[in-house]
Image (tube, grey):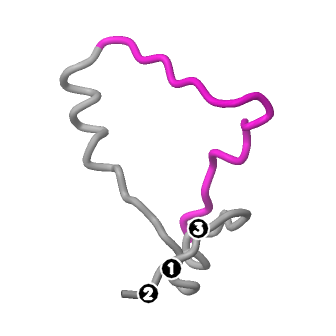
Amino acid sequence: MTKRRLPIGIQIFREIREENCYYVDKTAHIRRLIDEGKHYFLSRPRRFGKSLFLDTQ
């Protein structure tokens, strides 16, 4: 088994797939969050804002 590298600095989904980087798809959790929860606090480190977004082209 080959070890995949983390996509540090890569924000384009196509590049993540083409370069065989490690990626975890957590979209299945969205339905559970919507159905079971009311309020969520999603914290993140300072200065982490726009790097959360990913280009899905």
Task: Residue 46 in the image: state x and y as whole percent.
Answer: 76, 28
Q: CA distance from mark 3 to mark 1?
A: 11 Å
Asked which secondary structure carries label 3, the reply is: loop
Q: Earlier in the sequence, mark 3 or mark 1?
A: 3
Give the camera-side residue of 1 and 40: 1
**Residue lying at 25% horizontally and 48% vertically, measured from the top left:** 28
Residue designated by label 3: 6
Query: Does 55 sit above or below residue 53?
Result: below
C-alpha distance separating marks 3 and 2: 13 Å
What residue is shown at x 73% (from left), y 63% (from top)? Answer: 9
* Magenta span of residues: 38-57
* Mark pair 1, 2: CA separation: 15 Å
Q: Secondary structure at mark 2?
A: loop
Q: Residue at x 40, y 60 (%)?
A: 24
Of the pair 8 and 49, the residue shown nearer to us: 8
Vertical position of residue 19 compared to residue 40: above or below: below
Mark number for residue 35? none
- Looking at the image, is mark 1 or mark 2 earlier in the sequence? 2
**Residue for badge 1:** 17
Position of residue 39 measured from the top left corner of the image (x, y, whole percent): 38, 12
The answer to whether residue 15 is left or right of residue 27 is right
Count of numbered circles in the view: 3
Task: Give the crowd class for mark 1: few <14, some 14-19, many >=20 residues within 10 Å.
Answer: few
Q: Please, what is the three-letter code of the amino acid marked with disc 2? A: Thr
**What amino acid is at disc 3?**
Leu
Q: Nearer the viewer, mark 1 or mark 2?
A: 2
Residue 27: within the magenta? no
Queried whether the magenta region covers residue 55, the answer comes back as yes
Q: To which residue does mark 2 refer? A: 2
Q: Quadrant of residue 43?
A: top right
Q: Is residue 17 left or right of residue 28?
A: right
